[in-house]
Image (cartoon, rainbow, N blue to C red):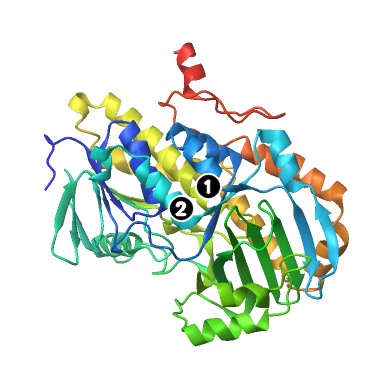
Amino acid sequence: MSSSNSPFKAIIVGGGPIGLAAAHALHLADIDFVVLERRPAIFEDRGASLIVHPHTLRVLHQFGILDELLPRGAELKHHLSFTADGHVFSEGNRYRLIRENHGHGPVAFHRAELIEIMYNGLPKPAKEKILTDKKLTSITTTQDGVTATCADGSVFHGSIVIGADGVYSRTRQVMRNLALKENSTRPWDPPHPYTATYQLIYGSFPSPSPAGQGYDTQSKGKSIMYFSGPERGWFFLYKRLARPTSDRTNYTEKEIDALAAEFAEFPLTKTVKVKDVWPRMLGAGLTNLDEGIAKHWSFGRIVLVGDACHKMTTHLGLGFNHGIQDVVVLCNSLRKALQAAPDRMGPDTEALTGLFEKYQAVRMSSVCSLEGDVLKSGLETRLHAWHNVWYYLLSWYLLALNVVENLFMRFVMAPEFRKGQVLDYVTREERMKGKISWIYPMSYQAKKED
């Protein structure tokens, strides 16, 4: 067990992009850590893509991996909206406006490649702290530290546990059990705090069109998002469920093929349909599209980040970006607390409880726009699937107008992007420079004021 005279150490559960981001941030803060990934490999290719917005590119630049990342992704530049019969009813300016406002457009990455670059960007001593085949089974806590036990019997001691293990977080489940064991009458989130109204097929294939396209297809009850990269294309095929559910559903290959067949004639581009790329799929999966925010992000020495504590639909491409913001806010606070602690032994459990509660309060505040972005992402999903007549009218007649999109990007999205926080202890030259200034400048400017 970690004791009061042991150096502070974080146990990160989950070796996906948010877990690796936490590894980068802690390494740069000179805070010891270990990453426990349940899968046998870090670079498992599940066919998915991630959209990275400019405020997140700033943080990845602080990690020292931006120059390696950008050539592997595709900056989105062209946007079209189709109906299911191939009619183009909108040609938007959103990507151009983001570039003009913030210095770079959003970038589409293959998830496995992003993870690979994030991993390779760590120095060798940090890489050696990332362990695979480590499936968390239990956590025990004391006033001095935590112990995480894995299915293979291995045991890890530390000061805190950071749950970065996704929407079906084992850390969140264990944390809930510990909280209710201490007080069975306390109000707490249900075992799965999210609800799904839609399901989606995600997948990748050899790109059939020039890089930089970000298109959508809209129809009643179904919609598509399509992105094209340098080598791969990615799609998300959405269908409304018969009824909302909080249950986890494991779909079969037969069910995936059957659902994909319903989209066969839907357009991805002006010349490519779903049926044209389906036989050439490089990877695909079917899952329910969870939405929601957990009420409890921490208990004692355990804290959650990313999809483990909030989940939004994928239409605005904001999920990964909000997970990065979690890591930034949390690690900035941890570093300050350690600097104030004698001999870097770290704050006690009471102080950590306050730190974690403040972290959640900051992330849930209007400054961070998390709650609003969960709502906006869900709204976008329902607009594209014409969830009811009002969504159809809004999408078809109002939001298809460029003037409305321009106003939305300028007065809704731009103020939110500019609030993006960065690590306040990492010095980097600002690379993202647009018409709108960042509220949180890079550290080298802040240090001049110290």
Using residue 191 as the reference point, say whether residue 435 is left or right of it.
Answer: right
Vertical comparison of 221 with 37: above or below: below
Q: Which residue is mark 1?
A: 72
Residue type, label 2: Glu
Residue type, label 1: Arg
Quarter placement of the C terminus: top left
Q: Which residue is mark 2?
A: 113
- Of marks 1 and 2, which one's residue comes earlier in the chain? 1
Using residue 429 as the reference point, say whether residue 316 is left or right of it.
Answer: right
- Distance, label 1 to label 2, CA atoms, is 8 Å
C-beta proximity under 8 Å, tags 1 and 2: yes
Q: Please tell me in which quadrant of the rendered image residue 350 appears.
A: top left
Q: Position of residue 191 (x, y in %)?
A: 39, 69
Vertical comparison of 52 with 234: above or below: above
What residue sits 81% from the left and 69% below the top?
392
Q: Secondary structure at mark 2?
A: helix
